[in-house]
Amino acid sequence: MEYNNKKELFTVTVFSENRVGLLNQISIIFTRRKLNIESLSVSPSSIAGVHKFTITAYADEETISKLVRQIEKRIDVLKSFYYHDDEIVYQEVALYKVPTVELLEEKNLESIIRHHNARILEITREYTVIEKTGHDDETTALFEELKRYDIRQFVRSGRVAVTKSPEEYVTMYIEERARRKEEIERCLKDE
Amino acid sequence: MISGAEALIRSLLAEGVDTIFGYPGGAIIPVFDRLYDYKDRLRHILVRHEQGATHAAQGYARVSGRTGVVIVTSGPAATNVITGLSDAMMDSTPLVVITGQVGSELLGSDAFQETDVIGITQPVTKWSYQIRNVEDLRWAVARAFYIASTGRPGPVVLDFAKNAQVAMMEWRGYKKCHFVRTYEPNPVINDADVERVAAMIDKARRPLIISGHGVEIARGEKELLALAEKAQVPVTTTLLGLSTIATDSHMFKGLVGMHGNVAANVAIGECDLLVAVGLRFDDRVTGDPAHFASQAKIVHIDIDSSEFGKIITPDATIHGDAREVLARLVDKVSPARHDEWLGSFDKAWKIETEKVINPELNDKSRINMGCVARKVSEAAGYGAVLVTDVGQNQMLSARYFKYTAPRSIITSGGLGTMGFGLPAAIGAKIGAPDRTVCFFTGDGGIQMTMEELGVILQYGVAVKIILLNNNFLGMVRQWQELFYDRRFSETELVNPNFVMIANSYGIPAEDVETLDELDGAIERMLAHDGAYVLNVNIDPEELVYPMTPAGSPISTILLNKDERYEK
């Protein structure tokens, strides 16, 4: 297969058994190829007992395709995929903590919140926490706007993503593996 | 109720284990205590250093095809097995290495002889798992043997916490593992892929096979020869694949790679179809990959699909067990004749024979390494197992030994581990007691794991040790001579009296100073019923040829200091 060698941000997903030490196994595969993980998030998937890692990294497609195969080779990994941005629906969450006193004087606060489709999670005398979900450029835009209110803390989550494909490959794979298990057990019984 | 340590021993027996290479220590004493009661069924070979245990287990596994088993303690013992694990990972060797670990309650506290075994071993193992709970034990052992020995084999580590060794459990029998949901060692071979490759072979006018370690692992030697003969495809091999075809077979055309045969490397550039079976296109095989097999369609057959396109982009692949794939191809291909193509190898062979092989074998002025290897191979009736260390001794013994049976070369190919040889030879002899095991080493490599002579002493392991002694780290010296202006930085060794060392371990030994002493010494060595050491005086000026300089196209071949191969 021919790839262009342009670097872009890829989203890598990994489905694995829920076993201690997997994050380490996956991250060293990135390290060994000098790939910096831009963001990472780990959670249970829709399938009971199966964990999902969502990782983003800048690389060319050839590198990322080889990386995915090395990840999938790890024994406790079920499946691993990589995606271009247009193949997935993805989201990130950002939290901004600003001194409440800075906001009190602001006449445009409502329009900022409205414009960015953000929400206020908590207000105390000392600080206010604003939440914004969106793509990287959107959470960054709000950051730029809130800068003048003296942001005390800012954090952005790793990307989470689901595919646009109508096929659920992991579910299909797990079903296929269950059939394989039955087949092997039948063979053993016959012996 | 039985202890976790007892359950481990019973599990090993249930897996058919009869030999363990190991070394006791604090965090594994409960296991060794149980082992004491199983001496009649489980032979434990006490090595002298844990690295030696892993290499011995590798030698045992490679010669027999069975999984090598190692039991050592925690901390420094666990760090000492890392080299063997890496080596086994690179050369696809099935090992189950059990390390002791401090009790679960102490984990993470920098306890005495605690080390992060899982963290350290993950990058160099196929799988590693910490047994903290005795209830996991049978599951983990069964999985370990299944994973280590199936698919593309490799090393597995079980880190056995001391609390789980002493905890009590109900035995309730042992179930072998036959299935892991996330791992498929026997991929179903795609018929369409086989058809496609068979058609490519039928169509090719200058087809060439490279046979690798995967053919040996799959025991596909018969099928390889059948395919070669039916479709008239000449066979070359990698270093680890050398004994997948008899050296004297009319279909064998040579070793590929940096110090391979001229005809084989030239053919890679000239073939129109390259069928690579069970190999991973190591840089020592390909030279500059951009110039590799530039006229050829490339077919890659492997059980590990992550190898496809890793180095060389194939035109077709077959994912599966090498023996099965070869058998299917034998059925599908049409009988063919490629007389002219087969004959075309003769010219390069003639030149190599004239310029390299004859001077190596027939030099009257000194003892050449290749000459020693050929003489030993011949005197042993060509049926011996060759075990090598790493460097010039490795390349020249591999080149000049002859192979007539499968599983006859055991060498550290991927990792290139100096010190691999002596313990691997011990393991090989234990794994194949009826075969003659000839171990070729250098004065550098043998001193890296020389302590294992103690194992030969203790267990009477009849390894024939041929020490090609030039008082130099010869391969590095060769590069310094060819590429670093003869600046021999830190490659000269002042060596001990190896004969006295061997004798102090109860091993008969002799110095071979001149060529006229060689034949008699070899005869005495092979006639002796036990281990034997020949310390052979080698000229440090002897270099390994042919040679493709690192990073050059594989067809750029130096025949000697002054001549290159020209078509």
Image (tube, coloured by chain):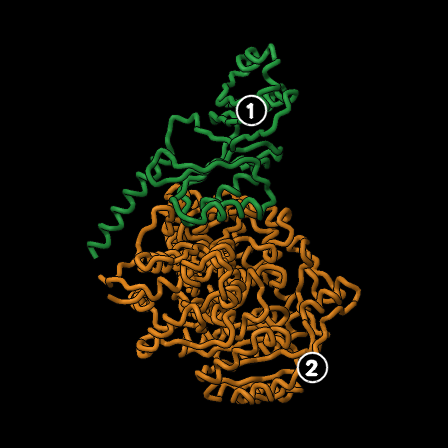
Chain colours: A green, B orange
- The residue identified by callout 2 is B366
Q: Where is residue B461 in the image (x, y as percent from the top left)?
A: 45, 81
Callout 2: few (<14), some (14-19), or many (20+) C-alpha neighbours within 10 Å?
some
Residue A137 versus residue B485: which sits nearer the camera? A137
Q: Which chain letter matches label 1?
A: A
Answer whether residue A119 is visible to the viewer in this image. yes
Amino acid type at mark 1: Tyr
Name the mark nearer the viewer: 2 or 1: 1
Residue B116 versus residue B152: which sits nearer the camera? B116
Q: Residue A127 carries which label?
A: 1
Going by the image, does B486 lie left or right of B30? right
| Marks 2 and 1 belong to one chain | no
Residue B10 versus residue B191: which sits nearer the camera? B10
Going by the image, does B525 lie left or right of B496? left
Residue A57 versus residue B275: which sits nearer the camera? A57
Q: What element carries label 2?
A: loop
Classify the position of the C terminus of chain A by image quarter. Answer: bottom left
Q: What element carries label 1?
A: strand
Would you identify the image quadrant in which residue A164 lies? top left
Amino acid type at mark 2: Arg
Q: Tell me what residue is drawn at x 24 percent, y 66 percent.
A: B1
Quick one: which residue is furthest to the front in this view?
A125
Q: Tell me what residue is drawn at x 69 percent, y 67 percent.
A: B476
Q: Which chain letter matches label 2?
A: B
Question: Where A125 falls versus A158 (above or below)?
Answer: above
Question: Where B265 falls versus B195 (above or below)?
Answer: below
